[in-house]
Image (tube, helix red, strand yellow):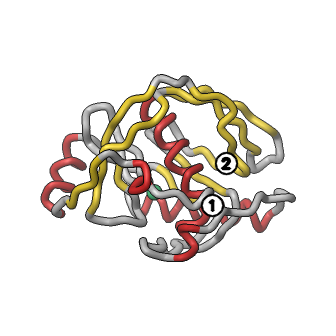
Amino acid sequence: MAIMEIVKHPSDVLRQKAEPVRKVNAAIRRILDDMAETMYEAHGVGLAGNQVGIARRLVVIDVGDGLLKLINPEIVRRSGEIVEDTEGCLSIPGWQGEVPRDKAVQMRATLPNGRTAWFDAEDLFARAIQHEIDHLDGVLFLDRASSVYEVTPADAAAGEESQETEADGAQTAASTPGES
Ligand code: NI
């Protein structure tokens, strides 16, 4: 496995709509493995293909319940109950925002073994899914946030101490952001 470089905003690939993966093969599984290693190394809770410069519909997520490697993830149902919470993003270091999202979603995705799986997600897991699938559509949390603000490294460190969850863009109920 290998650590990949995380693309930072502003970058064209972060604004691209990622292409679906047609065939799940060893190369795709290897990219997902590298994305997972990269996410953990960056203390994130999620990472999308665009964020490592690969505009394919690939996502890794771990909000504390174990690693998920997802191919062509799609939201198939939204709760319609909107909740606002703090998010950060590994591609937008030093910034956070308050972002309204559906409290719960149902997601369908292909797994690395080629099988299709459905997930019922709530709260942080649901938020991370929405944040990552937005990445695949070229959408950043900045686009949806009701407010965006700069955070100092000291703020971020305090947050990490009080909550160990960090992902690409999602965060915990306690108001500590994770980055995805
Ligand atoms: Ni992100």
Residue for badge 2: 70
Residue for badge 1: 33
Indicate whether 65 appears above or below 47: above
Binning the other alpha carbons within 10 Å of mark 1 as few (below 14), some (14 to 19) or many (20 upward) gives some
Q: Residue 53 appears at what percent x and percent y?
A: 59, 74
Q: Amino acid at mark 2?
A: Leu
Q: Amino acid at mark 1?
A: Asp
Q: Is mark 1 within 8 Å of ligand 1?
A: no
Quadrant containing ligand 1 reads bottom left
Instruction: Name the residue at 46% across, 27% down.
Output: 103
Q: Residue 4 appears at what percent x and percent y?
A: 53, 73
Of tags 1 and 2, which is closer to the observer? 2
> Does residue 137 appear to the left or right of 125 in the view shown?
right
Report the front residue among 157 and 98: 98
Report the front residue among 4 and 91: 91
Query: Which secondary structure lies at badge 1?
Result: helix
Instruction: Name the residue at 71% across, 31% down.
Output: 118
> The C terminus is located in which quarter?
bottom left
Q: Residue 176 appears at what percent x and percent y?
A: 26, 42
> The N terminus is located in which quarter?
bottom right
In the current view of this chain or complex, which residue is farthest to the left?
154
In the current view of this chain or complex, which residue is farthest to the right?
23
First of labels 1, 2 by sequence position: 1
Label annotation for residue 170: none
Instruction: Name the residue at 21% across, 61% down.
Output: 150
